[in-house]
Amino acid sequence: MIVLLREVWENPRKRRDRLEIIARILKVARDGIHKTQIMYEAGLSFAQLTGYLSFLVKSGLLEATKKNEKVIYKTTPKGIRYVKSYEEIKRLLRKSTEHSVTSISPPFSFPKRST
């Protein structure tokens, strides 16, 4: 399990989970940004991004405002707290896997039956 966690954190090509994608969107939108810019900077398709934006606005993590006939998305204070918490959890997991990987004992095995 610890080795698997380490691979996830060290391999940037590994699939991203929803929490990571949400954190990325919120980071990108911290100062206010258009939907297309979020799509490119977060590495999402238009359909994926539309679903995430809807969820994040409904959750109060992101706000959408119209400016010059275009919608600008900006991270709310609640969204900033999410990003900080997400980064802290990532840091704690990384730190715990660094300490644990060196002290992992071989996997448990059952004794062989004598027949």
Image (spheres, helix red, strand yellow):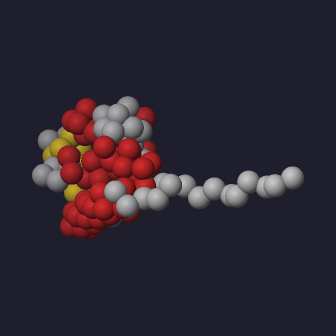
Given residues 97 and 26, the one toward you in this image is 97
- Residue 110 appears left or right of 55: right
Q: Quadrant of residue 11?
A: top left
Is 75 placed above or below 17 here? below
Given residues 96 and 32, the one toward you in this image is 96
Q: Is residue 55 visible?
A: no
Q: Is residue 111 visible?
A: yes
Is 17 placed above or below 87 here? above
Q: Position of residue 84 (x, y in %)?
A: 23, 64
Q: Position of residue 2 (x, y in %)?
A: 43, 55
Q: Quadrant of residue 70?
A: top left
Outermost residue, front direction? 114
Q: Position of residue 3 (x, y in %)?
A: 42, 50
Is 79 placed above or below 11 here? below
Given residues 81 and 102, the one toward you in this image is 102
Outermost residue, right direction? 115
Say which residue appears at 30% left-offset and 62% top-offset. 99
Q: How many marks?
A: 0
Q: Quadrant of residue 60?
A: bottom left
Say which residue appears at 74% left-offset and 54% top-offset. 112
Given residues 110 and 87, the one toward you in this image is 110
- Residue 8 appears left or right of 23: right
Say which residue appears at 16% left-offset and 49% top-offset. 32
Say which residue appears at 14% left-offset and 41% top-offset. 68
